[in-house]
Image: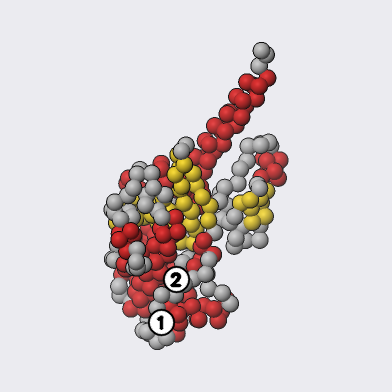
């Protein structure tokens, strides 16, 4: 599973200077023709049908259409997206690098946030904000605007721990206003982007929120700001209200999908081998 686009058996890892090729891996592992590179969120999408109900937290039940497209989004070290599209033979995954599309501010505050991030990086992508780094940037932005003073407890924790984990923990506890405001803005932007994905694919089969961050901030996702931002897209609020939204709690979703991809690969190899034997059979 690769965090980045896969094309013709080659992958360039988005946030690392790595280039990986199926042929070289096949030679190194002595597995000729048996190695396939799969985008991490394509694998995650393939794993969705195998999740037990207990692995999902429902944010909105909606009214799903049987056989409707399904969208998958997940913030972690970056922002991943993918979809499952209905075809006559069943669902097929559609890869996406939509997380690297431009961020679209929805308010004066988000306009200011975009300027804050642009001054540091030159471009504001959705991935830049909807990630662990993004939560840290949102916190730094609100702190720079004097929304609230940084507490001594948070300052000490930020020196010792991962900033996103600190901001999430203090924000969920609602004992630190700056962390709580940062987490709330992050959740709202996350909900809006999930709604964008739902519209892009017309995901009437549902939206699944995966990645490393969502399960850790589930109480914040349930407070309402996520769904308000998800649905606040006139004139299509009624359409979005019908779309189910679930959070994936299973941390190994990608491995479920990798196993599904391997199974598909085996079936395809057997199908091709069967066709070859049929052609060679004597009359």
Q: Quadrant of the C terminus?
A: top right
Q: Is residue 154 visible?
A: no
Point out the residue furthest to the bottom here.
146
Which residue sits at x=44%, y=55%?
201
Quadrant in which residue 278 is drawn: top right
Residue 83 percent coordinates (x, y): 46, 51
Residue 18 percent coordinates (x, y): 66, 57
Residue 159 percent coordinates (x, y): 48, 75
Which residue sits at x=45%, y=80%?
111
Which residue sits at x=38%, y=44%?
67
Instruction: Using the image, determine if residue 269 lies above or below residue 130.
Output: above
Left or right, 87 with reference to 205? right
Are there few (<14), some (14-19), or many (20+) residues within 10 Å of tag 2?
many
For label 1, the SS is helix
Which residue sits at x=66%, y=50%?
10
| Residue bearing mark 2 | 135
Q: What label does residue 108 carry, if any?
A: 1
Left or right, 8 with reference to 212? right
């Amino acid at each position: 599973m690769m965090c980045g686009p896969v094309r013709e058996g080659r992958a360039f890892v988005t946030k690392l200077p790595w280039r990986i090729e199926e042929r070289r891996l096949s030679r190194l592992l002595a597995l000729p023709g048996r190695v396939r590179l799969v985008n991490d969120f394509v694998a995650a999408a393939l794993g969705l049908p195998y999740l037990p109900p207990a692995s999902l937290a429902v944010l909105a039940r909606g009214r799903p259409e049987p056989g409707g497209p399904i969208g998958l989004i997940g913030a972690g070290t970056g922002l991943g997206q993918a979809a499952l599209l209905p075809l006559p033979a069943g669902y097929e995954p559609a890869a996406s690098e939509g997380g690297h599309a431009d961020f679209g501010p929805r308010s004066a505050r988000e306009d200011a946030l975009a300027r804050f991030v642009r001054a540091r990086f030159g471009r504001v992508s959705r991935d830049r904000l909807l990630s662990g780094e993004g939560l840290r940037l949102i916190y730094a932005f609100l702190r720079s605007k004097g929304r609230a003073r940084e507490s001594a407890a948070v300052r000490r924790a930020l020196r010792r721990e991962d900033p996103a984990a600190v901001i999430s923990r203090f924000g969920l506890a609602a004992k630190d206003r700056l962390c709580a405001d940062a987490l709330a803005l992050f959740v709202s932007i996350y909900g809006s982007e999930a709604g964008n994905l739902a519209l892009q694919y017309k995901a009437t089969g549902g939206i699944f929120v995966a990645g490393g961050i969502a399960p850790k901030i589930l109480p914040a996702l349930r407070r309402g700001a996520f769904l308000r931002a998800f649905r606040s897209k006139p004139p299509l609020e009624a359409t979005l209200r019908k779309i189910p939204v679930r959070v994936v709690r299973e941390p190994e979703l990608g491995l479920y999908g990798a196993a599904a991809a391997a199974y598909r690969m085996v079936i395809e190899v057997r199908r091709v081998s069967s066709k070859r034997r049929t052609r060679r059979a004597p009359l």
